[in-house]
Image (spheres, helix red, strand yellow):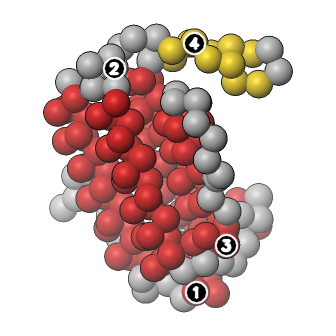
Amino acid sequence: MHTTLLHQYRLVLSSRETLFDYCEGISRQHFCQQVPQFNNESMCSMMAHAAATYLNWLVNFAQREKIPYFESNDCRDIRATRAMFNQINIVVNDFLDRFKDALDVPLTLPKREGVELTLTPLDLFMHVITHEFHHKGQLVNMSRQLGYIPVDTDVIRS
């Protein structure tokens, strides 16, 4: 299963790279502009949130290591955003390597104020990638509202 998940993440990387290439054509001003229809979030803040979610679940939760989350300032332009996600790629590869023989072993860990969650590493991996894709759709929609014509960022593209 480890090999399958690595392959799946390569598909995520391909889709993400298509999004990043598209974002190269978005002005820095628009990239960081708050969009009222998205609770005044910006494309930049949405990407920082997606990256922080990887850190929250794969490092802080699953591995009980505390590392700081990304902030909107960490992705002030697409070059910085790529660098931020390069760090996420290392996190994902380390996570998959660490749990490759225990992907279905439940982890029961405290989340906050007496709440415990029981999730498997596979649950966590699926959550972070589907979370990223959810926000990727919002990013494309945000760019459309800012006057851009989005490209196809699906895993299977024509």
Q: Which residue is mark 2?
A: 103
Query: Dot 1 corresponds to which residue?
Result: 28
**Where 108 falls versus 9 (above or below)?**
above
Mark 3 or mark 4, earlier in chain: 3
Quarter-of-image position of residue 94: top left
Judging by the rendered image, the residue that carries numbered circle 3 is 73
Q: Is residue 72 left or right of residue 57?
A: right
Q: Closer to the camera, 9 or 40? A: 9
Whole-percent x, y for residue 123 in the image: 44, 23
Identify the mark nearer the N-term, 1 or 2. 1
Above-or-below relation of 153 to 3: below
Measured Cα–Cα span from mark 2 to mark 3 = 34 Å
What amino acid is labelled 4 in the image? Thr
What's the residue type where badge 2 is placed?
Answer: Leu
Q: Disc 3 on helix, strand or loop?
A: helix
Give the mark nearest the N terminus, 1 or 4. Answer: 1
Q: CA distance from mark 1 to mark 2?
A: 40 Å
**Foreground of the two, 72 or 11:** 72
Q: CA distance from mark 3 to mark 4?
A: 33 Å
